[in-house]
Amino acid sequence: MYTLSTEVNPKSRREDHTMPALISRDALERHQVWFYLVAAVLGLLVGSAVPGLGYVAEGILWPVLALLLYVTFVQMPLAKVPAAFADVRFLVTALIGNFVLVPLLVWSLVQMAPNDDAFRIGLLLVLLVPCTDWFITFTQLGGGDGTRAIVLTPILLILQLLLLPVYLGLMTGINVADVFAVADVWPALLVVLIPLSVAAVTESWAKRRNVRRRVVQSLGWWPVPLLAVVIFLIAVAQVRDVMGNLNVLPVVIGISIAFLASVLVLAKLLGTVARLPTAQGRTLTFSMGTRNSFIVLPFALSLPAGWEIAAIVIVMQAFVELFGMAFCLWFVPRVLFRDRATTPQTG
């Protein structure tokens, strides 16, 4: 999901004067869910009023999604991947949480979902992949360790792309290769890999010119409006499928809430066993609780006719997660991983 900042101190974002004067980046991030809801409602209204725009929206969606991924990836410190291995305890704990415990949790939750292959594929796609963008923002706002969140992010991205096909193959009773035909998946894969490659080149260039901070700040406020455009286009293009599948909304909400509640318990247990400091425990929680909804969206959109519900499930889960994170910003630092009280000294 997409509100990424590489600034360790969130207050520094308010000092960024490269953003549009009409609205600050901080305001965009804090109120992003309302932008997305407005975009979704407008898209459904426009798509219903002018059904022919659906084909146009589908054509525009792919380049806009690629641009969204690029401005997100360009803020990701890919060069800091080696630094993530310095803190072995935190890294191992985060990887166990995201790639062992969470997949087991997701598998158990999917068993409670309707016996519909498209619906279950959508849930698996979105719940198996840890977030690599607004995870950082929520970590910072929730009093977590922003530096470790930043260096962990590229590793999460690389591992999820490698492991997702493995998880899907193990957890579905269908032949994934038949569903994700090579001819259909390659365009979706390129929508992810090309922005990632261009972002890596951009980072290398900006680092040589010593302008990386300026580049990050200038592009930092773009993810929220671009994601709103993506949601608007999806709503326009998929309005018939959305309106025809409103009955699955309660199921998606229920599973998403169960997922987040379970993750909070798992993160607390895992952080306690690993004896993580308070800030790192919060970072672990937001890492396990946020999902990478829109990086898997291209793959859902590449599914054949009859599988449209998978993309709808992904978008629905993203909205539930946003409201869940608003709760976690209060719950995680005040209840789950509270600051250790200092004992007054007597003399």
Image (cartoon, grey):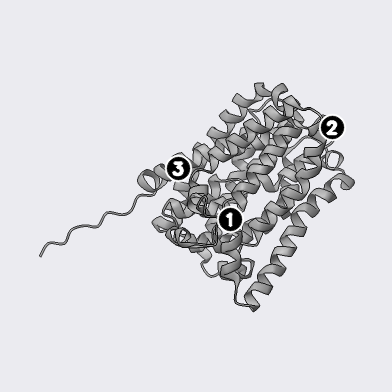
Q: Are marks 2 and 3 in contact (CB under 8 Å)?
A: no
The front one of 231 and 160 is 231
Image point 47% across, 41% down: which residue?
326
How far from the left and from the top, in percent, is residue 271? 45, 52
- Alpha carbon distance from label 1 to label 2: 35 Å
How would you rate the neighbour count of disc 2 (Cα within 10 Å): few for under 14, some for 14-19, many for 20 or more?
Answer: few
Identify the residue at horizontal 61%, vertical 59% (top origin): 219
Mark nearer the viewer, 1 or 3: 3
Q: Secondary structure at mark 2?
A: loop
Q: Is residue 336 above or below residue 275?
A: above
Q: Amino acid at mark 1?
A: Leu
Image quadrant assignment for residue 40 = top right
Mark 3 = which residue? 328
Q: Is residue 256 above or below residue 214?
A: above
Name the secondary structure under disc 3: helix
- Residues under labels 1 and 3: Cα distance? 21 Å
Q: Amino acid at mark 2?
A: Ala
Residue 287, percent across and down?
54, 51
Circle 2 sits on which residue? 305
Q: Tell me which numbered mark, 1 or 2, is placed earlier along the sequence.
A: 1
Using residue 183 as the reference point, say whether residue 124 is left or right of it.
Answer: left
- The answer to which of marks 2 and 3 sits earlier in the sequence is 2
Secondary structure of the residue carrying numbered label 1: helix
Q: Which of marks 3 and 1 precedes in the sequence? A: 1
Label 3, residues with CA under 10 Å away: few <14, some 14-19, many ≥20: many
